[in-house]
Amino acid sequence: MIAVPLPSVPVIPSPSPVEGPRPRVPFPSVRSPTARRASARSHRPAARPLFPTEPALFPWLERRFSPGEATVWIGPHSHVARLLELLYAGSARAGGRVSLIEGANRLNPYRVAEDGRSLNVDSSDLVGRIRLARAFTAYQLVALVDGWAKEIRSFRPSLLVAHDLPALFETDEVPPEERAPLLGHMAETLRTLSERTRLPMLVTLSGEPRLFPGLTEHGPRLFDVVRFRPRAHALDLEAYREAMHLSFVARPDGQRGLEEFGPDAGQEVSRWDAPSPPTGRHWRSG
């Protein structure tokens, strides 16, 4: 396990989330019986918040996690990786720690630092709150997952992240007859970890769950599944458990967001472009 340095980089604007209801849709057809039971239970919030209350993205994400259960993100590499970077910074802002096993080797420390500064998180503090482990072969990756329990006891994270573990099996020369058993073994290990540590776990996939054999049958209990659906100049996130969606819409350069104008107890807020309040007296000319 190694800690990744997070050097300073310029800050760039982030997309603005918009939440809204959607017609109820079922969980993916590959879900397991444990996932069906999880979808029927009420959400049990963590004892300590995983993320800050602002911006609006973080409370939405907070509701997608549950202690001792897994949340699955499914979507293209670039979109999932970008939201993960913001998630790491948000976790640090809330005083949490992330233990990450990186299967796709796509962590961009510059963007994590960039997002951290936008949330007023010092880079030196941020680097100490993210513990990264990555492998160069599929067999090394299996060994990292097997040894994750020891790292968790040492680091005491608040969130576990398994980022696209099957990706390394696509690039490494793993015999076809070994691929499914190794991935199935990792799925069972993830289940054991989530049950014993009672920590929320995030599992990300760049493709359908069938690319991770054993995940839905023998993996951790599923709490929610979030699909990333890119579209022109926007990104939609669909959460299956509550049939909710979140849309990221690009903000033009120089445009300011409403979140900048939140209430401040130390300031007086005056009406702008609104009708004057009634005074109880009617105006008469002359």
Image (cartoon, helix red, strand yellow):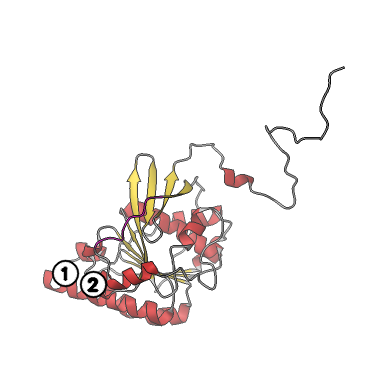
**Magenta residue check for 150:** no
Q: Residue at x 24, y 64 (%)?
A: 30
Closer to the eye: label 1 or 2? 2
Image position of 188 (left or right of 226): left
Q: For residue 110, which quarter of the picture?
A: bottom left
Which residue is located at x 34 percent, y 73 percent? 221
Say if the magenta span includes residue 26. yes
Say which quadrant the N terminus sits in: bottom left
- Numbered label attached to residue 214: 2
Q: Position of residue 127 (x, y in %)?
A: 50, 65
First in sequence: mark 1 or mark 2? 1
Which quadrant of the structure image shows residue 268? Answer: top right
Magenta stretch in the rendered image? 22-29
- The image shows residue 46, relative to residue 13, as above or below, that is below
Amino acid, disc 1: Val
Q: Is 264 above or below relative to 160?
A: above
Dominant SS of magenta comes to loop
Crowdedness of circle 2 by 10 Å Cα count: few (<14), some, many (20+)? Answer: many
The x, y position of residue 271, in whole percent, is: 71, 38
Q: Which quarter of the figure is the C terminus placed in?
A: top right
In the image, 30 versus 106, the foreground residue is: 30
Q: Amino acid at mark 2?
A: Gly
Please provide percent x and percent y for residue 123.
Answer: 54, 61
- Marks 1/2 in contact by CB < 8 Å: the verdict is no
- Name the residue carrying label 1: 174
Looking at the picture, tell me which residue is in the foreground, 29 or 257.
29
Q: Residue furthest right?
A: 286
Residue found at x 55% / y 61%: 52
Disc 1 secondary structure class: loop
